[in-house]
Each structure stands twice: as structure tokens, then as C-alpha cells.
Amino acid sequence: METAKLKQKKRVPWKKIFIISIGVFFLLLISIGIWAYLQLQKPMPQVRGELEVAGLADEVSVYRDEQGVPHIEAENDVDLYFAQGFVTAQDRLFQMDLSRRQASGQLAEVIGEGMLDQDRFFRTFGLRRAAEASEAAYDEETYGYLEAYAEGVNAFMTQAIENGELPIEFRLAGYEPTPWEPLDSLTIGKYMAYDLNGNWQGQAFRHWLAQHVTEEEALDLMPVYPEDGPVILELAQNIPVDIKSAFSKTGDYLPHPFAGSNNWVLSGERTASGEPLLADDPHLGLATPSIWYETHLTSPTVNVTGVIFAGVPGIILGSNEEIAWGVTNVGPDVQQLYFEQRHPEEPSTFLYDDEWYEAEVITEEILVADQEPYEHEITLTRNGPLLSEYASFDEQAEYALSMRWTAHEATTELQAVLDFNRADDWDSFSEALTSFQAPAQNFVFASQNGTIAYRANGLIPIRPEEDDALLPVPGWDPAYQWEGYIPWDELPTIINPDSGIISTANNQIVDDDYPYHLTHTWAQPYRHQRIIDVLYAASDHTAEDMMDLQMDVVNLQAEEFVPILTRALGDREQSDIEEQALAMLQDWQYEDLRDEAGPLLFHLWMDEISSQLFKEALPKEIYDLFEGRANIVDEMLRDADEGQTGPWIEKAGGFETLVSTSFQQAVARATELQGEIPNDWKWGEFHQVVFNHPLAAITPLNYLFNGSPLPADGSRITVKAASYQTETGIVTNGAGWRGVMDLADLENTHHLVGPGQSGHVFSDTYHSQREAWVNGDYHITSLQSEQYQPLSDHLQLIPK
């Protein structure tokens, strides 16, 4: 009995056990939270005090201002670029490593088999091979700076690995980066050429059309209607290449169809200050971290500020104490697909000029995480790599497609970049342009002596009359070989025009009198027209006006097409919601503002028109290759409004039926998205920017690396470019950097880098410019040490 009582006294009440367990659980959670916080804080770069670094000759000062922009002050140029590599790696090492891996076809090594197809594609495309070919073309001085930059990256990398301070992304992905090489910087440069050149897929698309639709339908989707259309289609119709199978997965790797830019420059006669103004905002992918890294570099020979791609030395867009410059993409036809005829018994032997020759076959080992390496075979014909067989080699196929591309040549863009930084007038800047060959870019320029100028610069092939760049051509026929490149002094150039205005927005830059072919596919004209309208409307422009124009969201496409489309609707019977939606659209003032309903309905309507025209007829793999679709659809609608209905619109039931059906579908989708009251719809509830981090695709890492979506103004065709995914509305492409330079005050320039400078999630500058990007809140970056030094974190790099 006493024993039983004793046991009862020792029994712990269950409620107490529960409370203790809960306490232990929460203590564990807190411990895990503290550990996670410390892990995230651990790789934060040192930005204050002194830091010994092996490889420097002299001390270097690094001042990071409140936006995280590093102002690097060095006693010599080698130390300057060494420090730039070190500092950029402090902020962006994981991004740099992913960039070189993507361009080199080395993602499967760290991510796994899911990246194998992409790696095979880029190995075949040959960006790293092209970079290797370019190394020897650099002069000794420039290559020395590339080496110094790489040594700086490696100095940081070595310290981070030794101290266990690599960015958290490396630990999440489970690998360490390998040493940086000058070749890595060159390869990233080649990737940018890839991202801004892409006419090969249009040729593949039109070849598929020749094989699968009527002749009339194929010609209707040409960017121009060739006079000898049936003749140019005949060859494609008779050469079987399975485009759909060959490029079934490439849609995820292709350059963004709306990649472009705005730039303009005004002479002093057009400005309030009497000095030139220059503005530039390149449109590329929007992500965390930004594709752009803003930097200020100072040495005895250079004092330059602006932006550069993480992993590349110098400043590619910006200004120094004397000049400013910016770029947009020319978008010329610098790629060509060739039909290659294979020997029936020797799969690596091909026909050229009535003789058989042995192509070069190389095998590259692709490392794959947790698997055996993959042996990837690449066939290099005299015209270029066999692109159509990147995923699978078919030695039984009589024909394949190879590709020639200007960026496969040995080119020296990074030499040009470093020379820009030291230029002080148009003569020295244009001399630097001779080294910039790929990609071809529209450069605008301004100097403090009042000069404004423009040049379309880069390698652009001279094509034979037989080759109009619309379709693949016979690789075995010498008549289809390029005849060199447009001579440098014959590239489109403008210096000090009487109008005092130079502007480009990927628009057509030459008229029919220009003796050389550039391209058939220009951007839709709306951005450029709006820029011109605003610039010509006044002669007292200020830097603030230029920033306002970069944020302008007037939709000239809607201004043109809303009347056309509503007229085509006619008096057809509509539901109550459709009537309300139409009335709302007609009251809209054609501005793509986030709180407006009009942009939502208009863009859904235009997207639905394309869907109605092509969804059933074109497989997704083929639709992804459709170059110039937006311009082609615009022209179809214009022609139909004038009574010239083409075969695709006829197939959709005629113009009125197409417009009516697509309107009904657009209203239905808007209703599903945002309810049954059209006046309450908001563009910004659909059209939002996230700035996705590359690891955010893995749940729940999106909650760590991404911010919440932000409603955004603009669209694909406004000056404030904000191209979006049709299905989700998420903005994926736009001006990651916006810059405005007033030549009356080049010591203080205006910048916006969305979403921020740092790649470290706990940094104050990780997402410090997300809302600024949406709202147009620029910051000033100063060249004056007395301006930035007192307000900056100061790190002194000491030779070790």
C-alpha cells in the first residue's frame, strides 16, 4: 500500500509534461532560428575597417554609399580591376558563378540531370569556345586587367572558403565555386551577345511553316512579304528537317522576345541647362540580384561610374568626367541557319561546292551531379555547329541545320569597354568602338564640349543577293556564303544632327536607301514614337524630364487599336459585363497605370487575338520560335481593318469573328481574375513584379529570397518597359537599370538598379530599390569624394 502511494507521488501530471514538451519545442525552434540567422549573416561582406588581401601592390579604398554602390579608389589600374573583382565577388559571387556556368553549359554539374538538356544546348552553341577563340585577340594590357580582375575574385573566394563564409546559396546548393579565370569574364560577355541576338529561331520557324502550312499562310507570317515568296519557300519545302523535334525544349533557353532598350541624347539647344542630356535604360531579364552592378572606379587614369555585368571588369554603360554613353540593341540578322547535306555512309562528312569534306567532331564531358558524366558530341561544319542535333544525333538523317554567328568570331568587346572608360571626346570614343564587334549595338554619346552622336556598331554580315535572312539556305552552295562584314566607316552614324535629338528604341534605324541588309524584324514602333513625341515637344528639357520619360506609360498601341477593334465589334449582341467592359475601355486614356482597368482588358484582348490565331495551328515548341510575332499580328489587324483579310484571320472565322470571340474570352478571363465589375479591375493586381531569385523556384526558398509581388505600371510597348508572362502577369523583362546623365553636372548622375545592389538576402541593399524601381525614385551617384566619403562605409584593402 505504501509502495502504491509512493508511485502516485512520483507520477508527473500529463499537463506538466505537455508544457515542458512545448517549451522544449519552442526552444528548439528558437535555436534553429538563431542558427539560421547566423548562417545568413555569416557571409555578409566586410565593408568597414581594414582587410589584408594577397595580390595587391598598394592600398585600395572602397567606399560603399547608402545604396551599396562601391566607390573604388586605387593608385594604379591593375589594383583597380583587382579590387573591382574582389568587391563584386563580395556582393555577387553566387550570381557570377551561375552566370559563367549557364553560358558554359556547366549547370548540371551542380544542379543535376534537369539541367542536362540546357547544358547540351549551350555546349553546342559554343559560347565558351567563342570566348576561347577571343582570348588571343586581346592586347597584353587589357588581358592583364582581365587577369587582375580574376585574381581579385579569387582572393575573395579563397578567404570565403577558408573562413566558411561563402554565400548561403552555395551551402544550400551543396557545392563550392572553382577559381575564376579571365575566360569566365569573356564567356559572360559572349552570353550577352547571345541574349541580344536571335534571328536563327525565326529562320527555323519559317522552315517549319514551309513544311506544315499552305504557301499563302507561310508567306503571311513573314516579317516582310517577299516578292519571290514561292521561290524562297520551294527549297525549304523540299528539304526535310524535323524542327519540332530538334528544338522541342529550346523555348526555355531562347533570348526573351522583347529584349530591347531605350536611349536618347539631346543637344544643349534642347535642354534647360544648355548642355546635352543623355538617358539609357536597357531591357533585359528582371531578377534578384539585378543583372546590373553599379560601380564607381577611380585611378590616376580613369574616373568612371555606371553599370557592368557582375563578372566583367570596367563600366559598360555610364559616364566619366567628360562624356556619357548608352546603348540599345540594333538586332541585326547576324545568325544564319544552313542546310547541311550528310554523306549517306559517313555521318560526319558533308557536302560543299560539289565535294565531300570531313567535319570536326569534338566530345565534351558534361559533369552531372550524382551521376556519371555525359559525353556530348558536337559536330562543327565549315558553317558552324550542327544546332539541330544538339539533343540527339541522327546519323541516318540526310539533312541537318548548322548555324553561323558573328559572335563565334574572335571579338574584343571587353577591350572596348575599358577604352570607353578612358575616352574624353567623340574621336577617342569612336576609336574604342572599333574593338566592339558583338553584339551590334546602337550607341548614343554626349560630351561636355557639346557633341552628341550615334553609331550602330558591330559586326553585321554582308549577305549575297540569294540570301535574304528569312529561311535556312544551302550550306553546300558557295553562293550563299557571307561576303564579309559591313565596313566600319559605313555603319549608320549621326553626329550633331540639326534637330538636336537622337533616339533609338530598337526601331528601324535606316531607310530603303541604305545599301546593306540589317534585318527585317524591328521592334514595334510605339516606344520610339512616344519618346520622339515628348522630346520634340519642348526645348528646355531637364534631367527630371528625362527620368519622367523613362517612367512614361502612354500606350500608343492601344491608342491605335482600341478604335479599330471596337469598330470591328460593330453592333453584335453582348452581355451586360461585356457592355460595361467596352464602355470602360472606350473611356480609358491609354495609359498603362497599375490602378487602371483599361490596360488589363486591352492586353488580355491582344493576347487572346494571338491565341485565337495560332494556338490550334502552331505547336508550343514552334510558337516559341515565332520571331517578330507582335509586329506581324499588328500588321494583320491593320490590313484587315482596311479590308485586306489574310489567310490566318480567315481561318479564325474572319476579322469580325476573331475580334468578337477574342473580346469575349478577354472579358471572361478578366472576370475570372478580378470579378464582375469592370470599373473595379486593376492592371496592377495582375501585372506585378517579383524580381525572382534563381533559387526561389524551390519552395520554401521563395519566401527567403523573394519579396512580395509589387503592382507595376507599364507594359511591353510603353517607354517604361515591363514585359510579363501572359499566363501569370508576372513582369519578367524590363529596365533593370535606368540612367540619366546631365552633361552640365557629370559629377552627379541619376541611377536606378532594381531591385538593389547586394546579392546577400540580409543586406540593407538587397531589395532597397524594389519599390524605387516601381515608382521611379532615382538615386544620385557622385564622382566627388567629398560627397560620397562622409556618407559611406569605408573598407581599406591592405596588401598582404
Image (spheres, rainbow, N blue to C red):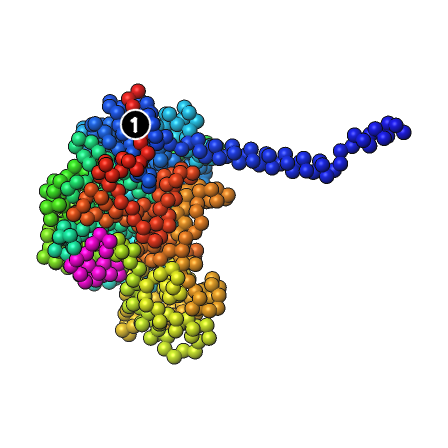
Quarter of the image with the N terminus is top right
At label 1, the amino acid type is Gln
Is residue 740 toward the left or the right of residue 764 in the image? left
Residue 659: % across, % down:
37, 70
Query: Is residue 447 something that shows in the picture?
Result: yes
Is residue 621 toward the left or the right of residue 193 in the image? right
Identify the image quadrant of residue 72: top left
Identify the image quadrant of residue 617: bottom left
Q: Residue at x 56, y 35 (%)?
A: 30
Which residue, given by chain and number where applicable, does mark 1 sit on? 796
Q: Residue at x 59, y 34 (%)?
A: 28
Residue 283: % across, % down:
30, 50
The secondary structure that dominates the magenta segment is helix
Q: Nearer the viewer, residue 548 or 306?
A: 548
Q: Residue at x 50, y 34 (%)?
A: 36
Residue 69: % across, % down:
30, 39
The furthest residue to the bottom? 571
Q: Residues within 10 Å of mark 1 (few under 14, many from 20)?
A: some
Please tell me whether residue 38 is drawn above or below residue 442 in the rendered image.
Answer: above
Residue 210: % across, % down:
31, 58
Q: SS at mark 1?
A: strand
Q: Residue at x 32, y 66 (%)?
A: 590
Q: Which residues are magenta?
A: 526-546
Magenta stretch encompasses residue 531: yes
